[in-house]
Amino acid sequence: MIEVSVNQFRANIKAFVDQALSEHSSIRVKRRAGKDFVVQSAEDWEREQETLFVLQNSSLSAQIIESIETHTTGSGYSPTSEELDEINSI
């Protein structure tokens, strides 16, 4: 995470916003008096919210773990050739 003072941020706001968007980096803006704040792209924020949702949902986490285990052991579902043909024709 990049850290800048509020004065640096104010003077170069366009450059910092462009950097957050293009490099997917968060920028922590430090204030002398008051709380700091973070600038990040909406895309990155949405991705982090989705990750938090998955991590907080125990049944979804269990499904992901089971899926990884069945994939690793090769014991998961395998579609028939007819099913694959149907999927691929979509």
Image (cartoon, rainbow, N blue to C red):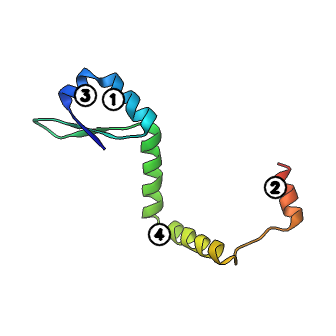
Q: Residue at x 37, y 38 (%)?
A: 40
Q: Nearer the viewer, residue 17 or 2?
A: 2
Instruction: Please tell me whether mark 4 or mark 2 is closer to you in this view.
Output: 2
Residue 28 x, y percent position in the rendering: 26, 40
In this figure, which residue is indicated by the disc labeled 1?
A: 16
Cβ atoms at labels 2 and 1 below 8 Å apart: no
Query: Are the residues flagged by discs 3 and 1 in contact, CB closer than 8 Å?
Result: yes
Q: Which residue is mark 2?
A: 87
Please tell me which of labels 4 and 1 falls first in the chain: 1
Contact check, label 4 and label 2, Cβ < 8 Å: no
- Rounded to the nearest angstrom, the CA distance separating label 4 from label 1 is 37 Å
Under circle 4, the secondary element is helix
Q: Nearer the viewer, mark 3 or mark 2?
A: 3
User: Residue lying farthest left?
Assistant: 33
- Of callouts 2 and 1, the N-terminal one: 1
Asked whether, in this view, residue 80 is left or right of residue 11, the answer is right
Q: In this rendering, would 20 be left or right of 31?
A: right
Q: Indicate the quadrant where residue 67 lies.
A: bottom right
> Disc 3 or 1, which lies upstream in sequence?
3
Task: Give the residue at mark 3.
Answer: 9
Name the residue: 46% across, 44% down. 46
